[in-house]
Image (cartoon, helix red, strand yellow):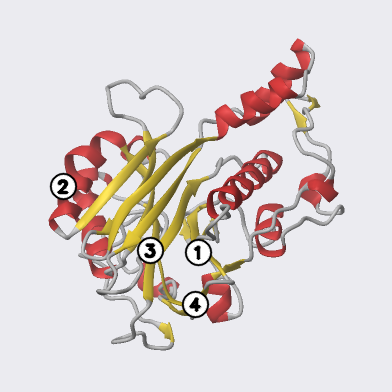
Amino acid sequence: LAPPPRSWLGESTEGAHDVLRVASYNVLAEIYATAHAYPSCERWALDWTYRMKIVISEIVDADADVVCLQEAQRDHFEQMLEPALKHAGYEALFTQKSREAMGAAGKVDGCATFWKTTKYRLAEQRALSYNDLAYAEAQAANLSERDEHAYLTRLVKDNVAQLLVLEDYPAPGHRSRRLAVANTHLYSHKDFPDTKLWQSLVLARALDSFCNRQREQLPFVLAGDFNSGPDSSVYELLATQGVSRSHPDLAPRTQNGYAAANVLPDARQITHRLPLASAYAAIMGVEPDFTNYTLGFRGTLDYIWFDQSALRCAAVAPVPPVDQLTRAGPALPNPQYPSDHVVLVADFIFLP
């Protein structure tokens, strides 16, 4: 019951050289795929062994050069995803969330980035733990014990990001081209927009220093599940390099009835320098209506951002229409679509 092939919107990149295809996919880890969380999906279709076969076929069909997965569960990555995709010509790097496994070993999810071995080799890697960055910031701020506890309670959520440098195999007489790839999964809770904004700010700054070196400026893509809609401060920060002081996400928040710790700098300091654009908005003029479609929520949470100074987005695979997604069930996941998210795929052309 695999999904039908995706259509494309934009220009054909067939036969063009200097093309980069990127896919991003939250594959819904087994530890979160419970009957309670997804009551509309038949139990057998929630089973990872069933879903994994479709997930792998979707990834192989996308035929991307770089694939960024979120909610890849460690045991399934090691035992199934990595071997199956190695067979399809990919190598991978896995970074697990900053927490212990839930019960049995390997029952913890994280981010996994795959690249086609015929096109790229891994030159550098860096795992980014938002927890570690929060601890470092709290220490540098010299907070009282009580304030530090409140600050860390707001920020320590175990999320991670991966930063990679991939190097291509150049034609004889040419230098190899290097590409930076960032893959992340931000905190999911809707009542913590300040936490997500803090995470995206520290990620943008880490990616900036990762890409802008003394003798080299690396082109980059940034993909993942940002758990934030197009109206969020996270989106505004990434798309415009700053956030309006009047954005509702910047309003003081409460937690358990008390004022929550303020974890953000002044609005004027919530900035970065990356020339980011969103692939789907670049081609369609607007983000998809949704990338996550469940009984209780439908909205856009996933994005493929790119470096406008070095890349041009040529085409995207639009999110399938609702009637196609819900043929096998009223929401996602269902027997035909194995995750509550859809795969995003975009084609880029390197600027001369």
Residue 25 sits in quarter: bottom left
Alpha carbon distance from label 1 to label 3: 17 Å
Alpha carbon distance from label 1 to label 4: 13 Å
Alpha carbon distance from label 4 to label 3: 13 Å
In the structure shown, which secondary structural element does the residue marked by tag 3 occupy? strand
The residue at which mark 3 appears reads as 23
| Vertical arrangement, residue 307 with respect to residue 255, above or below | below
Q: What is the crowding at mark 1: few (fewer than 14 residues within 10 Å), some, or many (at least 20)?
A: many
Instruction: Please state which amino acid type lies under the numbered disc 1.
Output: Pro
The residue at which mark 2 appears reads as 83
| Depth order, front residue of 185/299 | 185
Mark 3 and mark 2 lie on one chain; the one further toward the N terminus is 3
Alpha carbon distance from label 3 to label 2: 19 Å
Mark 4 and mark 3 lie on one chain; the one further toward the N terminus is 3
Q: What is the crowding at mark 3: few (fewer than 14 residues within 10 Å), some, or many (at least 20)?
A: many
The residue at which mark 1 appears reads as 219
Alpha carbon distance from label 4 to label 2: 31 Å
Q: Which mark is residue 146?
A: none
